[in-house]
Each structure stands twice: as C-alpha cells, then as structure tokens.
Image (cartoon, helix red, strand yellow):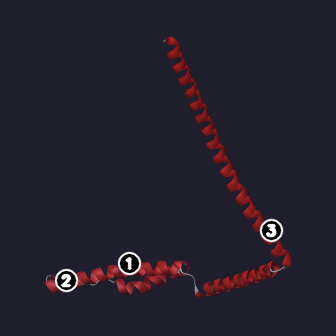
Amino acid sequence: YYLVCNYDTLKKRAELARFLVPLNIPEEMLGDEEMKNLNQEYIDLKAEFQVYHTQLEAAQKDSLSPNEIKKEIMTLEQEREQLNTRINMFKNKNNSPEFKVLLEATNLLRREQEEEAKLSEKYRTQRGQLEWTDQQLLSSQQRLIDAKRSLSVDNTAE
C-alpha cells in the first residue's frame, strides 16, 4: 500500500539515488592528496547537482504544460477576435453623420467651457488688482489729507 500511494515520490528518489550515491573510498587511499581533492570535488559536484535539480523541479512546477499553454493561446485568440469585432462595430457606429455632428458639438462645448474658465480666472485676477488699487488710492488720499492738515496746523501755529 505504501508503495502505491507514494509511487511518484519513490520513483523520483530512485532515479536521483544513482547520482547521489556516496563513494566508499578506503581511508588509506584518502591519505593521498590527489585522491582527497578528487573526493572533495565529487562531493561539491553532488551538492551542485542537488541545487540545480531543485531549481529544475521548481521551474517545471511553476511552468504550464503544453496543453494548458495551447488552451490559453486559444482563449486569447478568441478574446482578440471579440475585441476586433467590437472595435469594428464602434468604428462603423461612429462614422454616421449624427455622430459627427454630436462630436463637433461636444468639442465646441468643451472649448467654450475652457474659455469660460479662463475668463473667470482673468476676472478674479483683475478684481483683486482693482481692490488693491482702491486700497492704495484710499491710503494715498488719507496721506494727502493728513499732509494738508499738518501744513494748515503749521501755518496757523505761526
């Protein structure tokens, strides 16, 4: 029962086992420097193989199968056809004289609204300038009156 339930996992382990089997090298042979270096290189390559194999499995797990890709392509092509049909229908609708008149009217309305906004802003600016000028005039008139009073006081005091 265990073998049947875990068949895929056990199959993968069996396939990988032949590449990951440790070498049984007698101790007297590992005393040789060249043999020691070769054994270390073998261990490093085995570890590198495990890393690459893990990356391969992750990439295969994340990627779509060819059948899924074909289905996705077919779906996208159908959507493209539907969009092209809608675009053509919209173009045909928009070529009518009524639409052109409506389009021209909306463009004219938009231009008029922009012009109105510009004029409104200009009016506010000029109104502010007028109020500032009025204040300056009143201030100047008050200074003139004060100057005349001071002159008349100086003349009467003498």
- Residue 140 image label: none
Tell me the quarter of the picture where residue 48 sits: bottom left
Sequence-earlier tag: 3 or 2? 2
Q: Within 10 angstroms of label 3, few (less than 14), some, or many (20 or more) residues?
A: few
Residue at point 52%, 82% (across, down): 8
Residue at point 64%, 39% (across, down): 131
Q: Which residue is mark 1?
A: 51
Judge depth for marks 3 and 2 and give the one in front.
Answer: 3
Q: Within 10 angstroms of label 2, few (less than 14), some, or many (20 or more) residues?
A: few
Q: Helix or strand or loop: what does disc 2 sit on?
A: helix
Name which residue type carries label 1: Val
Query: Which residue occupies the foreground of this view, 35 or 141?
Result: 141
Q: Which residue is mark 3?
A: 105
- Residue 37 image label: 2
Above-or-below relation of 103 to 46: above
Task: For marks 3 and 2, give the CA distance.
Answer: 86 Å
**Count of marks placed on residues:** 3
Horizontal and vertical percent for residue 85? 76, 83
